[in-house]
Image: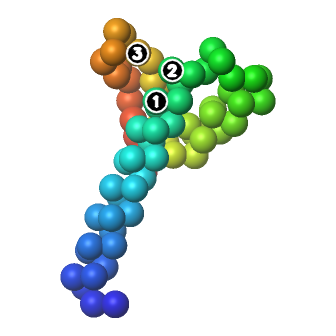
Amino acid sequence: MNNRDKVLEEKRTEHHKNKIAKLVVDLYWEEDRMSSCGKETLDKLATLVGVNDVWYEGTELKGNINNE
C-alpha cells in the first residue's frame, strides 16, 4: 500500500468512526424504550467509540464527542 492509499484509508476509517459515534449518540433518544440490558450495551458502545458526557438541549447536541 502506497502513502496515498494509506492516507485515503485513514480518512475513510476516521469518517466511519465519526458516523458510528453519531449513531450511538442518536440511540440515546431511544434510551427510555430500551431494556436495562439494552441501556447497558448502549453505554458500553458509547465508551468504546469515545462518546463521553453527551446530553441534549432541544434538538441540538450538547456535550463532548471524543473520537480517539
Label located before the other in sequence (1 or 3)? 1
- Name the kind of residue labelled 2 in the image: Trp
Q: Which circle marks residue 56 in the picture? A: 3
Is any part of residue 52 visible from this angle?
no
Disc 1/disc 2 C-alpha distance (Å) = 6 Å
Label 1, label 3: how many angstroms apart (C-alpha)? Answer: 10 Å
What label sits on residue 26 in the rendered view?
1
Q: Residues within 10 Å of mark 1 (few under 14, many from 20)?
A: few
Instruction: Find residue 49 and report its horizontal and vertical position in percent.
Output: 51, 46
Say if mark 2 contacts mark 3, CB within 8 Å.
yes
Q: Are marks 1 and 2 in contact (CB under 8 Å)?
A: yes
Give the amino acid at mark 3. Answer: Tyr
Point out residue 52 in the picture as x, y percentages from the top left corner. 48, 31
Residue 2's place in the image compared with 9, above or below, is: below
Give the residue at x 29% y 64%: 11
Describe the element under mark 2 as helix, strand or loop: helix
Instruction: Tell me if 30 is positioned left or right of 21 in this view.
Output: right
Q: Quadrant of residue 40?
A: top right
Helix, strand or loop at label 1? It is helix
Q: Residues within 10 Å of mark 3 (few under 14, many from 20)?
A: few
Q: Quadrant of the N terminus?
A: bottom left
Secondary structure found at label 3: strand
| Residue 40 versus residue 13 in the image, above or below | above
Q: Which mark is residue 51?
A: none
Residue found farthest to the bottom:
1
Q: Earlier in the sequence, mark 2 or mark 3?
A: 2
Specify whether 13 is left or right of 7.
Answer: right
> Which residue sits at x=69%, y=36%?
41
Name the residue type under label 1: Asp
Q: Which corner quadrant of the image does residue 34 belong to? A: top right
Coloring scheme used: rainbow
